[in-house]
Structures are given as C-alpha cells and as structure tokens.
Image (cartoon, rainbow, N blue to C red):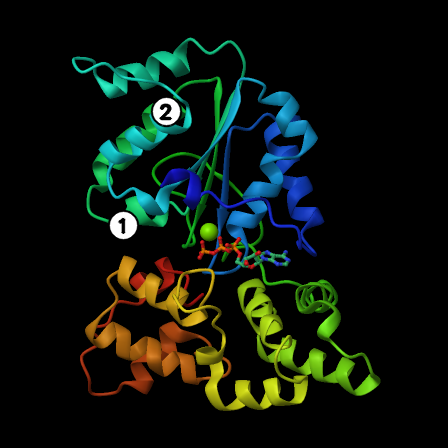
Amino acid sequence: MIESATPTVPIVFKGREDLVEQGVNILCQQTLRFLAILGAGGMGKTSLALHIMVSAFVKDKFAGGCYFIPCELFEDAESLVQGLLHVMELSVQENQSKQKILFNHIQTAHCDLLIVFDNFETPWNHGDRIGVQNLLEKIAKHEKVSLIVTMRGPDGPGDISWERLGNQSGIPTLLPVPAKEAFKAFAGNKLQSSDDSESQIDSLLHQLEYVPLAIRLSAQHVKRVQLKALTRMWEKGKTSILTEGPMPGRLTSVSFSIDLSIQIFRIEGRTLELLAVISFLPDGIPFWIENLPQMFQGEELNFNVSTLLESSLIY
Ligand SMILES: Nc1ncnc2c1ncn2[C@@H]1O[C@H](COP(=O)(O)OP(=O)(O)OP(=O)(O)O)[C@@H](O)[C@H]1O
Ligand SMILES: [Mg+2]
C-alpha cells in the first residue's frame, strides 16, 4: 500500500529550480528544520518535495535517512505511527508500544533524519487533530529530525514555526515559458509545430492558468486530438476534459482533485454555493470583506469563508 502510494520523482519538472534551491538551502545551509510546501491541489507540492528530497546536498546532510510518508493513507495519529514504522523498517513485538519503538529509533539516530509528510491535509482534517498535532510536535522536538510537510492550505500544521516556500497562498503556478516547456514535454512528438500551434498553446495554457496538473492532463489529449479541437473541448467542457484513464484520481482528474478538497474540508451547504459563485467570476471577489455582504444583501452570511481559504480552493 505505502510503496504503491509513494510517487517516483517526476521526470518532467519545469520552472521550479528556484524553489528547489530555496528548499535545499533552508534545510542544509540555514539548518532550519521545518519546511512547509503549501498550496492548492495539483500545484506541484509533492513533486517539489520529491525533488528537494533527492538533491545531492539533502542526501548528504540526512545520511541517517530520508523518509517519505504518503499521508493520504493515514487518517489518525495511530495509523501515522504505523506508517512511519513501516517506512523506517522498524518491527514491533506484540507487547511493545509502537510509539516507544518509533521514538527510540529517532532518539538513538547518529545522523540527521528527514521525514517528508506528504499530503498532510488528510490526517490534519480528518478528526483526530489533537492526536496528530501531538505526534507531529513530539517528533519535531528531536533536534536530529527535519520535516517537510506538503499540504493543501495556507498554513503549516500545529504550532511549529514552518519556513514556507512561495508566497502567502503557497507555491505559485508556473510561469508561461516553463509551462509551455512542460506542455511540450508531456505532449511529446505528437505535437505539430507551426506558428499557429505556438499561439494556440499559449492561449490554452493561459486559460488553464498554468496549473501543473491541468497542463499535464491537457497535454495527454494532444496525443489523440488536434490542438484546435482540444481548445474547443476546453471551451465547452472546462475541467471535465482534464481527465486521464478509466479511474479518476487526484493525479488523473482535475475535477476529482477539486472534489477531494471539498470532501476533506467538509465544504457543504451555503459555503459550497459561495464556492460555485466565486468559480464563475473571472477575477474572484476583490475586497471581499466589503463586497461579500453587498453581493448577498438581506441574506444571513452563514457561509464559512475561512474554510474555503483553508482548503486553498480560494485564495
Ligand atoms: N514543475 C512542474 N512541471 C511539470 N509538471 C509538473 C510540475 N509540478 C507538478 N507537475 C505535474 O503536475 C501533477 C500534479 O503534481 P503534484 O502531485 O506534485 O501536485 P500536488 O500539489 O502535490 O497535488 P495534490 O494537492 O493533489 O497533492 C503531476 O502529474 C506532476 O507530475
Ligand atoms: Mg500532493
């Protein structure tokens, strides 16, 4: 289970050189121990964490071990401990405490350790937040341990002083040039090159707002349909066309990725209606604190804007 949920380091990875360098620098040169990679679904948080984890400096510094925990599999502290034991290849006898074995391993480590808690929004929002927070903070107390957390949301978990990559709302979308390089690399040799197709790619990527997941999924279509047809499909079907394969998952469907946030953050009722309204507005709601009550005059404002902000579905 854990092995199959652990992604390999992506081969096509464009426009993130600065963020990789910053992350490596924080952990290795500045010897700060807590790095948060935050942002919306499909933005490339996990890919960035993996690239930081395999950099030569990081491998060198964390000779004690670099551990990747796919937290989407774990909903509470107990299962997280189980996952850590598995990844660290620690075995537990029947009458032993799992936490004791884990912390004994951490305490007796001779070299620095790095633990990557990937997609931490699942355990963090599932219900046992106190238990999960206690576990995370207990691990963070050990000086030999550095942490990377990737998570949908604007803040790192708990009272740990996280160093964040990117800006206020997390890591940004790609810039147009690397976005185009990524699109072309994903599309491969099926893409015919002409001046016309260059401007069509530019326009499509602009409409996809340079989100890495959307770029990868749209480029898969180019292997079967022409660019012109793809642009028309996007205009008609929007995110529904950004899928791949028969089983939708967070990496194969933009709609699935959005629905996942709606589920994890329990967005429902009026809050969900507000999200739907915002999604139709090309520029969102500028100065929302003043404008939202104006837009919904006479109605009780019982939707929860902070839940939407926490989910990174709006920012
Ligand atoms: N810089 C990049 N260049 C090209 N492709 C990228 C880049 N970053 C991410 N991708 C691709 O975009 C997709 C989504 O990336 P990733 O899983 O890292 O996003 P995420 O932010 O972790 O998503 P989630 O919130 O669902 O966990 C992957 O298929 C990945 O290969
Ligand atoms: Mg991820």
- Provide residue 91's location: percent of width, then percent of height: 32, 18
Foreground residue, 179 or 155?
179
Residue 202 occupies which quadrant of the picture?
bottom right
Question: Which residue: 70% across, 79% down?
Answer: 201
Can residue 75 be seen at all in this image of the molecule?
yes
- Crowd tier of the residue under label 1, counting other residues whose Cα lies within 10 Å: few below 14, some 14–19, many 20 or above: some
> In terms of sequence position, does the residue under pointer 1 or pointer 2 come before the other?
1
Residue 78 occupies which quadrant of the picture?
top left
The residue tagged with tag 1: helix, strand or loop?
A: helix
Q: CA distance from mark 1 to mark 2?
A: 19 Å
The residue tagged with tag 2: helix, strand or loop?
A: helix
Question: Which residue: 81% across, 79% down?
Answer: 193
The furthest residue to the right: 195
Q: Is residue 302 left or right of residue 26?
A: left
Q: Amino acid at mark 2?
A: Ile
Q: Which mark is residue 95?
A: none
Whether the residues at callouts 1 and 2 have beta carbons within 8 Å, the answer is no
**Is 117 located above or below residue 141 in the figure?**
below
- Provide residue 255's location: percent of width, then percent of height: 40, 72
**Is 215 located above or below residue 89 in the figure?**
below
Q: Quadrant of the N terminus?
A: top left
**Is 125 located above or below residue 273 in the figure?**
above
Instruction: Please give the residue where the numbered disc 2 appears in the rendered image.
Output: 139
Q: Which mark is residue 125?
A: 1
- Provide residue 144's location: percent of width, then percent of height: 48, 17
Foreground residue, 129 or 48?
48
Q: Is mark 2 within 8 Å of ligand 2?
A: no
Q: Is residue 300 left or right of residue 5?
A: left
The quarter of the rendering in which ligand 1 is drawn is bottom right
Q: Is residue 199 left or right of residue 29?
A: right
